[in-house]
Image (tube, rainbow, N blue to C red):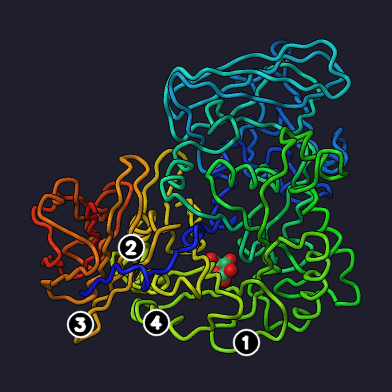
Amino acid sequence: LFVNASKASTKHIPETLFGIFFEEINHAGAGGLWAELVSNRGFEAGGPNTPSNIDPWLVIGDESSVIVSTERSSCFERNKIALQMEVLCDHEGTNICPDGGVGIYNPGFWGMNIEQGKTYKLVLYVRSLGSINVSVSLVGSKQMLATANIVADNVSNWTKTEIELKAKGTDAKSRLQLTTSKKGVIWFDQVSLMPTDTYKGHGFRNDLFEMVKALKPGFIRFPGGCFVEGEWLRNAFRWKETIGPWEERPGHFGDVWHYWTDDGLGHFEFFLLAEDLGAVPIWVFNNGVSHNDQVDTTGIAPFVQEIMDGLEFARGDSNSKWGSIRAAMGHPEPFDLKYVAVGNEDCGKKNYRGNYLKFYSAIKQAYPDIKIISNCDASSQPLDHPADFYDYHIYSNANNVFTSASKFDRASRTGPKAFVSEYAVTGDDAGKGSLLAALAEAGFLIGLEKNCDAVEMASYAPLFVNTNDRTWSPDAIVFDSSQFYGTPSYWMQHFFRESNGATLLKSSLQPNPSNSLIASAITWKNTQDNNLYLRIKVVNFGSNSVTLQISIDGLEMNSLQAIGSTKTELTSSNLMSENSFEVPNKVVPVKSLVDDVGEDMDIVLSPHSFTSLDLLI
Ligand code: AHR
């Protein structure tokens, strides 16, 4: 490997080259990063008409003691469904309630993770014509973990109740119960249970947030994906329905990935997430095109206005109509929104170009600094419409992804740059996240890094999967209510964390007979120790061990620099190795010290491996 560090042959790597793509898929948000423990908290999951579907809420007690139904009687105008519970039994008389009373329970998203010593905030809205005595409890499979009573005489109007519950035990499969042994009729609505220790109190599950933060993403693309399009336009993500007080959000059924979301993680929270991650937000919006229906360009004006309002929500000052709502939600400062994508994978669709141009001109006129991303691929031919970037997605087998490292070698250096917003090895080569997939993706990313004058941004997809709703496999981070791990594809991304804003050096591999090696070299500054490092990354995609001779030109290297220099390797004896809850660290980067450093040096690359050398310079 020849590395040339002379200034004339370097390239500046964009600050945003490597980032993340967050889509509401696989319960990534609802029942995932968003820490809300109650699923279907407003009983709206079956839609706005009665009877609605209260799933996964279940009834405690039989028909002789309790009857549960839904009604359009909520105090919240945008989500009218409330739950009515008619208690037929009592603590005295002829129809005595069973031990523990009757009522309803919510199992959360395949069990609520309740942890000893932690506090959970329960908020619910309740109404009854008589007095009530309701127990609220967090119940594990073996024991009661926390309980409190709501006793009230006058709740004839909807009444908000807030209770903090401190858990005296741990159980990852707990549930929330609302029970009573008192005859009467009680209505419930908007029942929320949140752990109080979310990231900065912003509602993000700490462990999953930290996993994402550890990637040091330069940007975050959100909220989809197909999620943005919908199978049908009526089910697409509509930002206005996801802002304001959580109780007032209608929620919606994501018909592409087949689940309901209460939209607690809404337009505002996505921007907050970007800010908390220190990542540039990239908002993908629906452009009047879904999988099965589309709005004609002649009728697109209201859709354009909706997006202009969404931009004002993010960027307007707090005196503006929509900016004032953001301010009221606790963020008077505008969000730093500078990138939007018009739709997702819609380029070939009939109205895409017509609609795109309407969005483009309205946005550019009001916000000339906002960069606009087109869905149409310009990697091999110029676009027929104006754009700042073009979206490019690749899902394929390992060989295709690995060899696509050269995809952008001949892409235009003068027109819009690529945003590789979704890449992954899929199918048999990937399983549920194999080493093989990660190696191919690493090779692909090295290719993108070397083409950073033609590629502006890249993100793996999908980011998350709740193991109980594996709609799309593989994914980078796997979790359930209490556990999580990174797949090899997650750990592979760690090798690129320092690339954003770094300097790419010219490097060439000769010989590379079977083309099974790919390498890049960057210099980067470690802000922790303030030192400058040369990082050489090499994928050995072949099954033989390789002794790689490295020759570094333009940097003075000597053996003293071995102190502080390291080698990190991602490999395994089995190419199809995967991580799991049981063995989360089967395929993770392993760091070792380097004992010899020089302008000419050899390193041994294991078969099927991804290696990074960090040399102090
Ligand atoms: O990442 C999963 C899906 O793949 C995305 O929603 C879509 O953009 C692509 O087809």
Mark 3 Cα-neighbour bin, 10 Å: few <14, some 14–19, many ≥20: few
Question: Which of disc 3 and disc 2 is earlier in sequence?
Answer: 3
Location of residue 403 by image quarter: bottom left
Closer to us: 98 or 383: 383
Residue type at tag 3? Gln
The residue sitting at 80% across, 21% down in the picture is 184
The residue sitting at 51% across, 43% down in the picture is 110
Q: Is residue 83 visible?
A: no
Q: Which residue is mark 4?
A: 406
Q: Which residue is mark 3?
A: 510
Q: Which residue is mark 1?
A: 382
Contact, CB < 8 Å: mark 1 with mark 2? Answer: no
Question: Which of disc 2 and disc 1 is earlier in sequence?
Answer: 1
Give the SS element for disc 1.
loop
Question: Which of disc 3 and disc 4 is earlier in sequence?
Answer: 4
- Residue 297: percent from left, percent from top: 86, 77
Question: Which of disc 3 and disc 1 is earlier in sequence?
Answer: 1
Location of residue 12 by image quarter: bottom left
Q: Which residue is mark 2?
A: 522
Residue type at tag 2? Ile
449 to 384, vertically: above or below? above
156 to 457, vertically: above or below? above
